[in-house]
Amino acid sequence: AQKLPKTQSQIGIDLNLDNFLTDSNGAMVANPCFYRQAKKKLAHAQRVFSHRQRCAKQEGRNLRMAKNYQKQRLLVAKLHAKIRRQCEDFLQVLSTALIKKHDLVVAEELRSKNLLKNHALSQAISDVGWRRFLNMLAYKAKLYGKEFQTIDPKYTTQRCHNCGTIMGQNGCRKLKLKAREWTCPMCQTYHIRDWNAAVNILEKGLGSWQNPKKQTA
């Protein structure tokens, strides 16, 4: 593969469930939710598959010779394969676009095993394919002569990128997960949570993370 030309552009990306990602320029990429879209159809196909399997066994037929069972088995397999292809294509196209447009892409280091412990979010987290996406960015950056790095996500969602104030410290109330928009109590800067996090991620990657600015009377 040939090295891609430099674009003099750097970007930070925040991966989230409301949108697949939000970048430090404020752009958002919607979460396609391929598995959720096909969940109802897949569940019906699997119920039919289980029913035909039971019927074949009750009748004492060899499953390899049960035509209806084999037909439904292939149908279920095709549905699973379609979901995998859709997800793979989405991740490939998006990761290639980011690497082509930017010399540096910075993302937060994911701890997927810890995230999956939250049973309320585990299905959604498994569906989006974050880990595969980060792996694609890593090898494509190396392939095309660009740079990709991951940073410790600590405080990226709680810090005001304008003045450096970290919510939950120095008397500031920590932001709850449901707070998608907020205003910094120190500098009064209005933030969209994911956009602010993406800016913080980029600053951390560039090494320009600053301590809170001193407030004047």
Image (cartoon, rainbow, N blue to C red):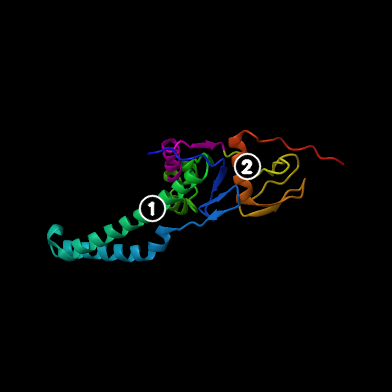
* Corner quadrant of residue 57: bottom left
Question: Up-down: is 172 above or below 208?
Answer: below
From mark 1 to mark 2, how far is it between C-alphas? 29 Å
Mark sitting on residue 23: none
- Check disc 1 and give the amino acid type: Asp
Task: Point out the tag, 1 or 2, that comes first from the N-terminus.
Answer: 1
Residue at the extreme right of the image, as rendered = 217
In the rendered structure, the answer to whether residue 85 lies left or right of residue 140 reads: left
**Residue drawn at x 42%, y 60% as measured from the top left:** 36
SS at mark 1? helix
Mark sitting on residue 89: 1
**Residue drawn at x 38%, y 51% as measured from the top left:** 88
Question: Up-down: is 22 above or below 203?
Answer: below
**Residue drawn at x 68%, y 43% as measured from the top left:** 161
In the rendered structure, the answer to whether residue 171 lies left or right of residue 140 reads: right
**Residue drawn at x 36%, y 57% as measured from the top left:** 83
SS at mark 2? helix
Q: Read off the magenta span.
A: 133-152
